[in-house]
Amino acid sequence: MGYQLNLGVWNSVFAVPSVLVDQHLKLAGAAQLKVILWILRYAGKEFSVSDIAQALSMHEADVRDSMQYWTETGVVCLNDNLLTPGTAAENTVLDTEEETIPVPAEVPAVPMPQPQEPSGKKRVLSRPEKPDTKYLGKRMKEDEGVAFLMRSADEIFGRMTSNNDKATLLLIHEHDGLPVEVLIMLMQYAVGIGKGNMRYIEKMAISWADDEITTLDAAEKRIKQLLSGRDAAKRIQRIFGMDDHSPTEKESEMANLWINTWQFSDEMLRAAYEACVNTKGKYILKYIASILTNWYQAGIHEVSQIKQLTSVKKQSKAKKDYEGTYDIEDYESTSVLDEEWDD
């Protein structure tokens, strides 16, 4: 079988600046490349963001984000002299090595707002400001690892991440010190459990950084613990009859302790839940946790042993001398158990 060049498709061509291949092919995301190619194809014609979005089956916000990338990296430049007479639309020009090609555009580059310092005392931030898009583009050019992180984020989320999301990832990488490979693993975990949003990822990343989880081995170990806790939490939900309840991080942590570490049976967990509801009239995580903690410390792992403990009374019931009792009635007199667990 032979091959023959189809000359018919060469009857209509357009120029692509070398800078797109030399500098941006490895940096720009798929959506950004699609947008710039479409603009080059229809150079000289008037169009809007909605026109591009409809032609490429993209969301308009993604088109605007792509345009912002090209303007802030200098590939597309704003030119006030190219305003179309009788319209309020701004136009842009594509900066190439050989010529300047007029390219209409809908969205101008929006500079990142700079933090305003009050007069006198300097504002103290608990966390630094996110890097602006210019710095983000600079780091993506300088560091292939950073560029790979941004491309990986697009693939993991299944969409083009916004510049704000990319800035958050860069902040986590450079300020919190999480390596690229660890951040990628964290994003994959978050998306896998249905929490693929940057707010959750940033919160988890800060926690990982505080716990010095900066290697793949440490990240894998933490993810296994988290998944184990989620499985335990689902089991707890079934035992407590709370299938429609979405467990908090604290509930997952405690469920992991009760089931995987302390090895409590379903019957013991149900007994603790019923003791809580019968006494307090509602589910209180801290109350159940205190019951199970005392049972574990007393070596109680069978429901039959619980009744034996109800006859055990401590001589002093003063709060300062309270060392722990395993009588359910005694739990009622302990005010600390009336508070719900703080998440």
Image (cartoon, rainbow, N blue to C red):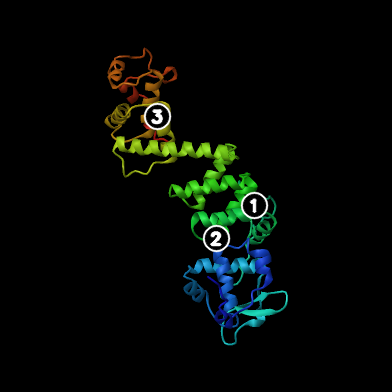
The disc at residue 258 is: 3
Q: In x, y percent, where is residue 329?
A: 30, 22
Disc 1 and disc 2: Cα gap in Å? 18 Å
Q: Amino acid at mark 2?
A: Ser
Give yes or no for contact between labels 3 and 2 (Cβ–Cβ under 8 Å): no
Say above or below: 51 vs 27. below
Q: Nearer the N terminus, badge 1 or badge 2?
A: 1
Pointer 2: residues within 10 angstroms few (<14), some, or many (20+)?
some
Q: Secondary structure at mark 2?
A: loop
Q: Amino acid at mark 3?
A: Trp
Q: Which residue is mark 1?
A: 145
Q: In x, y percent, where is residue 195?
A: 45, 49
Q: How many numbered circles does the render carry?
A: 3
Q: Residue at x 41, y 37 (%)?
A: 251
Q: In x, y percent, where is residue 35?
A: 56, 70
Q: Which residue is mark 2?
A: 162
Residue 86 in the figure: left or right of residue 341: right
User: Which mark is in front, 3 or 1?
Assistant: 1
Q: Residue furthest bottom?
A: 86
Disc 3 and disc 1: Cα gap in Å? 41 Å
Question: Which image quadrant is residue 164 in?
Answer: bottom right
